[in-house]
Image (cartoon, helix red, strand yellow):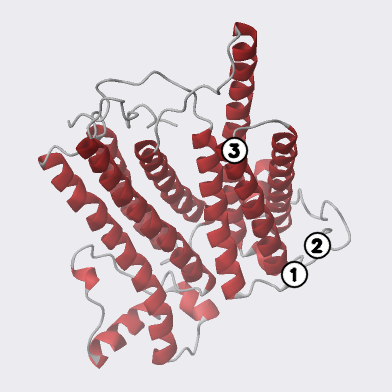
Amino acid sequence: MALSSAAHWPSAAASGSERAARRVVAVWLLCVCALIYLMVVVGGITRLTLSGLSITQWHPIIGVIPPLSHGQWEAAFARYQQVPEYRALHDGMSLSDFKTIFFWEYAHRLLGRLIGLVFAVPLAWFWSRRRLPRGLGPPLLGILGLGFAQGLLGWYMVESGLADRVEVSQYRLDAHLLLALAIYSLILWTALGLLGSAPSPRRGTHSSETTGRAADVGVGWRRAANGLIALVGLTIAAGGFVAGNRAGLTYNTFPLMDGQFVPAGYAALHPFFRNWFENIPAVQFDHRLLAETTFVYVLALAAIGIARPLPRRILTALIALLLVATLQLALGVSTLLLVVPIPLAAAHQAGAVLLLTAAIVFRHVLRPAREMDAKAGAPI
């Protein structure tokens, strides 16, 4: 993780006040993570309810205020009626129904603004009071910049569905989702680093041969955890294309797709790579295969971890990871078989972020031992 060196480990000489300050910063970052988590779930509901194009303008400041009068609601509804999505999918919608889809898009945008404030204002305060751990300021400023880019990308996504398309571009939708999760992951990793302390070598390993074997096992586990995070991210990206193409509404059988492992029409588009992003049978198959691979990967890690004498904190994180992966697989299969009911589909998206969280936590507890830094935790 890129930020692992930014949040230094607490030193043995660090004062109690410095450790407390680190915990305060970590709690603030975890609160931001919770808001991003909520925003991803609300964004999923916005997509599932076809609400994302209900607000056809982007006003970062005055957009905080929703329509208040009947005339303002009528004007907002009239603007939406000019969008191709309305004519294709919502023709004849009442003003009351429009207010419902408007609510989800408004809540999604409002959460984005709230996250910006909850991140930027405390960051400025901590920085001005010299309460940030040494070296953490510039990376957090970089994350703030990514947050602004996320807002622009969100509007860029919405804009793709306002003129020539019935729905937003699946490419822009997926990019918007993945950037949100990248920001979430960076903040979470930083917070975990602030809360943690440098792990000590296992007791009882005195010989160089034993120490070497332990180090080799550690490297292998860290590589496996890195691979898992990449696999989870790829599976989520494939899920974004399932959502973008509304591919979950067909082939509602499991484990086969209309009686076949690889569905007919998988390679219908040319050039071939377009199938991975635009062809419904291929998009759904890829997401299924990646999800199943992820589950088997976690299951194998858990089996190996239980068979080996892993430290308790690592084994606990691994078992938690297996439980979350099992839950997510059950949610995915249920969502598919029941033809994407909104509450279950939203829970499936929430489960994806929870699985990513569990994978990051598992990787974090595997971080290598390092010498205590006497200067760690010093204010910037």
Q: Earlier in the sequence, mark 1 or mark 3?
A: 3
Q: Quadrant of the C terminus?
A: top left
Report whether residue 132 is seen. Answer: no
Which numbered marker is on residue 254? Answer: 2
Q: Name the residue under label 1.
A: 337
The amino acid type found where label 2 is placed reads: Phe
The amino acid type found where label 3 is placed reads: Arg
Residue sticking out furthest to the top: 208
Which numbered marker is on residue 82? Answer: none
Report whether residue 50 is seen. Answer: yes
* Residue at the (38%, 53%) spot, across then down: 33
Within-10-Å neighbours for mark 3: few <14, some 14–19, many 20+: few
Tell whether 237 sits left or right of 162: right
Within-10-Å neighbours for mark 1: few <14, some 14–19, many 20+: some
Classify 142 as above or below 119.
above
Tell whether 278 sits left or right of 55: right
Observer-nearest of 60 and 42: 42
State the image coordinates of residue 322 (x, y, percent, origin top left): 66, 48
Label 1, label 2: how far apart the Cα atoms are: 7 Å
